[in-house]
Amino acid sequence: MVKRSETIMNYFVLLLFTAVVLLPIVWTLLAALSPNLDGSASTDLRWSNFSAAWTRGALGQALLASTVITVGAVIVQVLLALGSGYAFGVLDVVGSKVLFPVVLLGLMLSTEALIIPLYFQFRQLGLINSWLGLIIIHVGMGVPFGAFWMRATFRAIPASLIESARLDGAGTWRVLWRILVPVSRPAILTLVLLNAMWTWNDYFVALILISDPAKQPVTLALGAFQGRFTTEFNTMAAAAVIICLPILLLYAFFQRQFIHGVLTGALKE
């Protein structure tokens, strides 16, 4: 009887949390399809709100900017994470006991504390209003977590697997790319998704570094859209749905690998 009551309570809590998560999403979708400017519910669904938001908000250019920034940053972040995780977790490079804690200090530094000196430094380098400048900053922000994540992942792989590859004549780089990377695929995909979401959703750094409307990512475009169409909540909701859609599709496509990677990482030291 006790076990049954615990099961019922667990399902109740899960359903409650599911409702808390899904209700805002459903409400936003209904508002995006509403013919009423205030986004109130209606049986008449207006799909033209999405085309209006796309055209009036110039979302095509903003999506291109966010895609270039996110893809560029994620590729470099993951490559650096693989290299640093391999160096700290498998190779035990000289000075790793000192260097690795220094790298992890990056997790403790807030963006707000660094953005002013970064702004002046990037202005001297001519990287203001530049996608490259945003990519460099996001790469720097993602390296500490990536190094920590991949180090834990590689250290959890049995040492016998690595030794067997070395006995078969595999060199240092071949061990990484032919042995460790395929085995760590769920963790790597999880890292890709996390970095993609963080980069895509960034607003603060982009707000400081990008003032040119033609180069603004989707987060800034949505903010500008909200300022121009404050009274048209249905169009704003449609714009928000369009902006969120790429990340939602990416997560849906890699959902199984993402969950596996998170659960596996939770069991590692």
Image: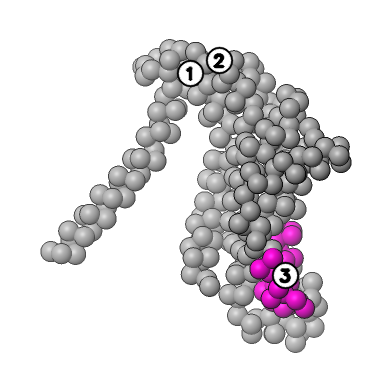
* Disc 3 to disc 2, C-alpha distance: 50 Å
Q: Amino acid at mark 2?
A: Phe
Q: Assign a secondary structure to mark 3.
A: helix
Residue position for label 1: 233
Neighbor class of circle 2 (other Cα within 10 Å; few <14, some 14-19, many 20+) is some
Asked if residue 56 is among those painted magenta in the image, a careful observer would answer no
Neighbor class of circle 3 (other Cα within 10 Å; few <14, some 14-19, many 20+) is few
Magenta segment's dominant SS is: helix
Q: Amino acid at mark 3?
A: Leu
* Disc 1 to disc 2, C-alpha distance: 8 Å
Specify the segment rendered in magenta: 78-102
Q: Where 214 sits versus 137, above or below?
A: above
Q: Nearer the viewer, mark 3 or mark 2?
A: 3
**In the foreground, 233 or 134:** 134
From the viewer's perspective, tell me whether residue 40 is left or right of residue 52: left
Quadrant of the frame with the N terminus: bottom left
The answer to whether residue 86 of the structure is visible from this angle is no
Q: Residue at x 48, y 18 (%)?
A: 233
Q: Residue at x 70, y 85 (%)?
A: 163
Q: Assign a secondary structure to mark 2.
A: loop
Residue position for label 3: 99
